[in-house]
């Protein structure tokens, strides 16, 4: 896979020519590791409580809330039966309400997470290891949004 085919560079619109492309090539290992991290948090072999399509829906939701339409659209393509959860107006209903509330809070008001937020997930049957995986997903997408925004700025784009 060419470094320019990685998700972060693709959604940022970085092609193989130009000054930004030259800068990318000097740090291609960063983008390769970013892609490996994406694969680990969005498409892990051990899915635990969160299947790949649910993870994609959550990633799309997080990207939408961060105003990254390109990244949100990219992940939405893989959301499958959970596509409706990508919409920030969807509260998850009885089946996914606690999960959605936690993801939204972790992504948008991290400092406000309390022990009761974790307890709510645990009481809903989510194992500690899966809570960690969920937090990794939120943190990764937040990172990816910021890197893509920086790359767009380097090209003179604001969105």
Image (cartoon, rainbow, N blue to C red):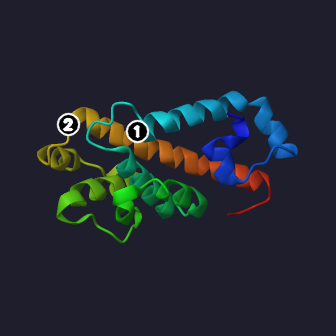
At which x and y percent is residue 12? 68, 53
At which x and y percent is residue 116? 18, 49
Where residue 67 sits, quadrant-wise, is bottom right
Does dot 2 land on a helix, a strand or a loop?
A: loop
Q: Which residue is mark 1?
A: 136
31 and 4: which is toward the camera:
4
Mark 1 or 2, nearer chain start: 2
Quadrant assignment for the C terminus:
bottom right
Residue at 22% across / 34% down in the picture? 128
Number of numbered callouts drawn: 2
35 sits left or right of 12 in the view: left
Determine crowd level at label 2: few under 14, some 14-19, many 20+ residues with C-alpha closer than 10 A.
some
Where residue 74 sits, quadrant-wise, is bottom right
Residue at 36% across / 72% down in the picture? 89
63 sits left or right of 1 in the view: left
Q: Which residue is mark 2?
A: 127
């Amino acid at each position: 896979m060419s470094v320019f085919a990685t998700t972060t560079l693709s959604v940022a619109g970085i092609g193989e020519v130009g000054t930004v492309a030259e800068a990318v090539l000097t740090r291609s290992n960063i983008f390769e590791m970013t892609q490996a991290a994406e694969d680990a948090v969005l498409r892990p072999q051990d899915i635990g409580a969160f299947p790949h399509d649910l993870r994609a829906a959550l990633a799309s939701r997080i990207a939408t809330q961060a105003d990254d339409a390109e990244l949100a659209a990219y992940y939405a393509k893989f959301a499958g039966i959970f596509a409706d959860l990508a919409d920030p107006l969807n509260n998850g209903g009885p089946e996914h309400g606690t999960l959605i509330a936690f993801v939204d809070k972790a992504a948008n008001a991290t400092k406000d997470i309390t022990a009761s937020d974790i307890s709510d997930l645990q009481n809903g049957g989510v194992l500690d290891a899966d809570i960690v995986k969920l937090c990794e997903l939120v943190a990764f997408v937040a990172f990816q949004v910021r890197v893509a925004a920086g790359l767009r700025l380097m090209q003179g784009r604001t969105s």
